[in-house]
Image: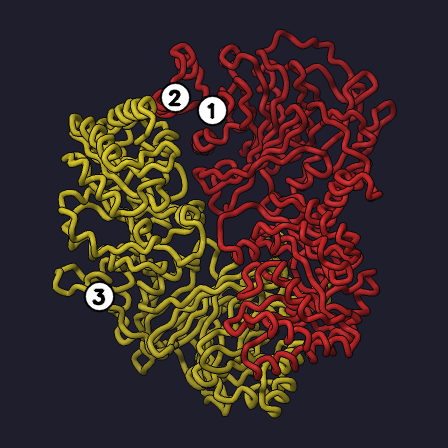
Chain colours: A yellow, B red
Amino acid sequence: MCLSGTLEDKLDAASAAGFDGVEVFEPDLVASPWSPAELAARCADLGLSIDLYQPFRDLDSTDPDRFARNLRRAEAKFDVMAALGVDTVLVCSSVAHDAVEDADRLAEQLATAAGRAHERGLRIAYEALAWGRHVSTWERSWDTVRRADSPALGLCLDSFHVLSRGGDPAGFAAVPAEKLFFLQLADAPRLDMDVLQWSRHHRLFPGQGAFDLPGFLGAVLAAGYAGPLSLEVFNDVYRQADPARTAVDAMRSLRWLEEALALRRPDAGLPLPPAAPALSGWSFTELAVDGASGPQLAAVLGALGFTHTGQHRSKPVQLWEQGTARVLLNAFDTRADAVRPSGPGVASVAALGLESADPGRSAARAEAMCAPVLPRTRGAAEAQLSAVAAPDGTQVFFTRTGPDGWPADFLSTGERPGPGAGITGVDHVSLTQPFDAFDEAGLFYRAVLGLEPQEVTELAAPFGLVRTRAVTGPDRAVRLALSVSALRRGGWAPGVPEPQSIALATDDVVATARALRAAGAPLLPVPANYTDDLAARVDLPEELLAAVREHGLMYEQDAHGGYLHLATDVLGDRVFFEVVQRLDGYDGYGTTDAPVRMAAHRRRRQATTSGRR
Amino acid sequence: MCLSGTLEDKLDAASAAGFDGVEVFEPDLVASPWSPAELAARCADLGLSIDLYQPFRDLDSTDPDRFARNLRRAEAKFDVMAALGVDTVLVCSSVAHDAVEDADRLAEQLATAAGRAHERGLRIAYEALAWGRHVSTWERSWDTVRRADSPALGLCLDSFHVLSRGGDPAGFAAVPAEKLFFLQLADAPRLDMDVLQWSRHHRLFPGQGAFDLPGFLGAVLAAGYAGPLSLEVFNDVYRQADPARTAVDAMRSLRWLEEALALRRPDAGLPLPPAAPALSGWSFTELAVDGASGPQLAAVLGALGFTHTGQHRSKPVQLWEQGTARVLLNAFDTRADAVRPSGPGVASVAALGLESADPGRSAARAEAMCAPVLPRTRGAAEAQLSAVAAPDGTQVFFTRTGPDGWPADFLSTGERPGPGAGITGVDHVSLTQPFDAFDEAGLFYRAVLGLEPQEVTELAAPFGLVRTRAVTGPDRAVRLALSVSALRRGGWAPGVPEPQSIALATDDVVATARALRAAGAPLLPVPANYTDDLAARVDLPEELLAAVREHGLMYEQDAHGGYLHLATDVLGDRVFFEVVQRLDGYDGYGTTDAPVRMAAHRRRRQATTSGRR
């Protein structure tokens, strides 16, 4: 149930992502035209074992007739299992009104069922659902298995059911290894809601949520479990996403989990992928532009104080520099003009260059963590660049900025960087994610690049809820702000549907704003109401408040300090620049002010569009 | 916050839908380029009063310095209110860690703030948030207002905050009318989750949820409240939907609420819209077909036992009949062939004809309930037909089937209905709703047509979660099954993205299935695994089980009885027929079996597509 589609789709996706086996969930089989034997043959062809069958719920019953009927149904399912060639069946603790409460009677019924299974060479893995009627903790399920004392009855442990209730995996050590029949893994965000709804809609792959999965897995392995690691992730987004992608995401989560556990237990001899080299900063940010947006972007970069210092040896790519900020303009397709003669032009963040201590190892790490490594055409005398594709399609390059690194691909224009506008480098890049890719992206940047995902925050933006999450490197030398529309879709998504921004750092945003204004940079106007409210909310020094008002700055605070920032208009169809100054260790991304900025961008886009008509 | 967009968008939408006034929520004002005076002028132009201003939270504080700062901020907001020309400001019970717990101290702080407001001719409406730190019930907020004893301090009542905590509106009677300053209305579904999340994401307009809004409003009015009825609906879907549509939906909810209250209190002299005439059944279902799908649909109708009995006088519309089931095929656009030479053709449910006791009154009712009445071209000697557009665009006609009704528009083909296949009429029509329109549709069918919305159920379908809800008429003579994809969007939505079906009733589905098979109807195959599982789950009579297996039927049960059903292939791009037999008062729509049907439809569509390539 991690994967969307029919059984056929799911098996193809699991096999392609490199899984060794699957659980079969009955609804998929029931809806399949394959007989159980045909399904077994298809799995064998795909290199997949069938490790568990999940046919039903609510086996035990206080009503003897009903229990007898349930046993008959179990026998029918044992026939299916024989044809599938699977030896373990999952039985969850009952949630029905007729669930057995008495511990001995429950154990007796499970022992009866396990006896029937045993005669067929099968076994039952018993699992406590967190919302089971009488059995809702793993301790209670273990008590039941112990009492039943049947060789064909053991435990299925599920990290969600244990950790969602604050259960302690340390107790697994008391369970004999041969009673640990199966292990299901799922992570989840911390949510204050009914545990059944939490479980059914919001589970995540290991490394995407808030649970300590390495600790959980470590405890299960230490107890002697040697079976498959199965992912059981009920998630509304994955249910409807491309299963091939989700399966790769799932495999990445297991690779991440394996490494996290290996790092905690160096003595366990678990294999380690190449460690992620430290990323010490931004080497470049590349914008793909067309014939309409390219000249506009070049003019704006000039007004922002950048200098056009280089031209690529073999491609239509310009290098613009100021401080350590380097922006590439890649004229990917000038024919787009012909198609959209009056539109704003197309521009987007196409690539991120990240400074790696060891680019080759970064690429090897990325490959080990299931990142798609990109093929790259390379001219003579050009530097070898390794790149991977992020979930939103952005290319991520691992670079070294030096005479023998990527700058060698650029011929000097002869222009030397001028005094500029006080921009010192890139503070962060903000990328709107495709709806299906938000949680995938958090794990991608964590596992592949070694960045640390921060809290997810939700934002009531003018055109719908937006979720944001930053991923950051050590010392915040690399910061990426990821966002996603919680529900918004096409049709009535006016203005700038999936904006991206490059936030440039300055040590004196007032001086930089003054220089930008003098140079005619297209700065986004901030409403006077905003500044009036700011004055009423925050005790800012008079002089600073005057500057905020004069230069159309925005200001917000977090627990550490303040954040002064401004934005440009949207350039092309979706890109804008920000100029930001962090005070006293402010660690956010201007999220509180974002709705004001979004409304202003919308208004400017409306004005431009109606002007053009 | 009911409406998506910038302040400008929201005001336009509220005015166009006929609202008299609005609340202004500070974030909208802060993001607006209009000064408060300009906003007031704009509202006046649009015929909107500003009835309340919502500038801030957490006024009271145990920290005297912080309270002093909050008062200063309040004074700044009083300036804004003066410019807006609004006299009432909302203050919610504090949720902050420094909220005042002591009842007298809290009353004293609110009295101080109210005194400042009073000097400016303003007043404060104090509201208990259901998750307020110390004040979370309306009784506690009233206790505070009573203690403060300030003429400028009164209550704001919010139906969500009262009803979500199981509060009793009967107590409002004890509050003097002059202390009821403001009323906010919101409905909500019953959800077992944190009340803050419930409130922020899942509120609904009155009539869309599970709360007794007529009872609540009745209690407030009986206590003497005579101010505005304000809708405060935080809802993730409405936040991102077309605000013009949402505003009409909102106005419809108030019309429905007014009527519901008037019916409960006939003595109150509230105005009543024309009552909804009883709908006694389906007169016709109209399918829009193109040159590719039209001949296919006609052939399938023939195989289902229908007879082509009539041809429209002036339009390319065929009438097909069997029992009381009447299907119209409207060849809306045969040019589509040229565009999609190899595709499956376009077909969709374009119109529903509902038999009304008084079609004219049905139309008047629809207009009173804000339904868009459709213009209609009409030839000589053709019947007057009144139609409105449902939220998904389907046209709903109010008809009388008789010699002087709509059948008079059809010339006889001379063919008489034959023995048919045992189909007696239409059981229900299933329509997939656009994502934004699901809750709107429930209220539309309830308020406009007088149908009764049933429970919303959720279904784990192969390509994502699906929510379904039926709306039904008296004696179930009219049943509509509405569904919506909970998250699915374009891109990876294979097969049949937004299916529609016409479910035909039979008294003997086995005999009908036999006739259909003999006539070569394109019946959807049901996997053998499904029937094997059914046999293990349900004790069906041997003979019936054999027939289920032979004819590819499906069977499910509810608390009342059983449901035998089959489906055809998808015809054109999204329409299929079902044949259904209800046993012993079964009252559902085959939802449990739907995933099997969806997977089978997907598989057939894949086979057709690959066969065509």
Disc 2 secondary structure class: loop
Which secondary structure lies at badge 3?
A: loop
Where disc 1 sits, the SS reads strand
Q: Chain of mark 1?
A: B
Is residue B83 shown above or below B487? Answer: below
View extreme (top): residue: B419
| Within-10-Å neighbours for mark 3: few <14, some 14–19, many 20+ | some
Residue A553 in the figure: left or right of residue B79? left
| Label of residue B585 in the image | none
Q: Are marks 1 and 2 in contact (CB under 8 Å)?
A: yes
Quarter in which the N terminus of chain B is drawn = bottom right
Return the x and y of residue A303 as percentages of the image width and height. Answer: 57, 83
| Amino acid type, label 3 | Pro
Residue B419 visible within the image: yes
A229 and A63: which one is in front? A63
Identify the residue position indicated by label 2 in the image: B538
Query: Which amino acid type corresponds to the residue marked 2 in the rendered image?
Result: Val
Q: What residue does disc 1 label?
A: B557
Q: Callout 2: residue from which chain?
A: B
Residue depicted at x 32% and y 60%: A373
